[in-house]
Image: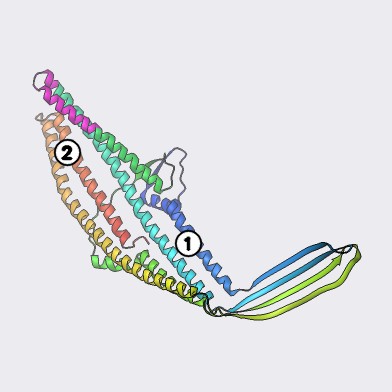
Amino acid sequence: MSFTLDVSAGEITLALDEAIAIALRDNRDMRLKESDVQKAKAKIFESRTGFLPTVSATAVWSKTSDYYPDKDISQVSAQATVKQTIYKSGKIINTLQQSRYGFEVSRAILDGARLDTVFSVTKAFYTYCLAREYAALNKKILENTEEHLAMVVARYRDGQASESDVLAIRESRASVMEAVAASASQVEAARALLCNLLALDKDIAITPRGDFDAGPKEVAYEEAFLEAMSRRPEIRQYVAQEKSSQKAVEIARADGRPTIYASWDYYNKSHVVGASGITRNWNEHNVLGVTVSWPIFDGWATKAKVEQALIDVKAAGIAKEKTVADIALELKNAYLDFKDAIAKINSVRAHVATYKDTEQVVREKYKEGSASSLEVSDASLGYDIAVFNQRQAFYDYTVAKALFDTVTGGYA
């Protein structure tokens, strides 16, 4: 999925799937991880070159002055060498296999970054949506508080309210104004975070399009655990890392074993004396040989390298075990948060129904003349607050569901 953004107006409208697609394409962390994958792929190509011969050529021109009487001698020589490794105690093939495992590690890390990015964007997107709704609610609360203040001031002028009543409502208004300012800052902070995740300009205004997930769905923990063990990229990462460490042991051991290579060298050389011309014909010859090299003693350097590689193998195994335990704990916490979010949705629905009924009753009384407009405003505000609490419950459920999907490897 590809999107082209028009930010010329300084404002864009985004749905969640569009925001995720943009982040997966443009997020800086994602681009860095993709670079690591490309680098690991190039490393495989580099490892394959060990099977191919090396070819080198050298050409030299030299001039000797003031050595021979009345002569300056120039010399031209050329050399070409072809060298092919025949046997290197398994170092080349193990290096290639290690590079392939390194590529698997980098791809698993990229998949993990994709999971984290999708969750981060999802949470930031819905946090921004909720912050905007909270800011709008605080403005309604401020308007209602202003109505109460006007009523209390009017009653105070008529002698029906004390100065303390006026001071109390003014204090409430100040608190509400503080909440309005704080909620506006929360909106700006959420917008800035979303822009950063999407690699957008920090001043771009974003209008979110979409709604929270309001459909609770039960899940089975045991099935989710099995799914996480099979799909989480961290498992694949440390399995590949362990295999890579095992290959590193063989690579280290190869340093103490024989190496055999064949070579062919071609030489051509001539001598020239200034104005006298050629004094000797070109000297052309070639050498074909096979070399066997076996390190007898290297001060136990190879032994130390092998021991280090074996420690890395053990460390990779421990890291894999730790990852499995961490995923199990992470999944358990996400599962409990998910269940709590579902329970909260079921609870707030009853509150919304109660406040909606109260608002309808007050409006009917207002039509009959037995309730004031301020009472209608209070009832309407109470219903708005109940609806916002429900929206917040939907937000908690949506984020909990996104986290649960993430820890089970749902986006990998």
Give coordinates of residue 109: x percent, y percent.
Answer: 41, 61
Asked whether residue 36 is in view, the answer is yes
**x, y (%) of residue 154?**
14, 21
Q: Which residue is mark 1?
A: 37
Disc 2 crowd, CA 10 A, few/some/many (<14, 14-19, 20+): some
Q: Residue 157 in the image: x percent, y percent?
A: 13, 18
SS at mark 1? helix
- Residue 263, quarter of picture: bottom right
* Closer-to-camera residue (187/210): 187
Q: Nearer the viewer, residue 290 or 401?
A: 290
Left or right of 76? Residue 208 is left
Residue located 53% across and 78% down the image: 297
Q: What residue does disc 2 label?
A: 382
Could you tell me the amino acid type at mark 1? Val
Left or right placement of residue 114 versus residue 361 in this view: right
Question: In this view of the protein, which residue sits in the foreground, 280 or 54?
Answer: 280
Q: Which residues are magenta?
A: 154-177
Residue depicted at x 50% and y 61%: 38
Local SS, label 2: helix
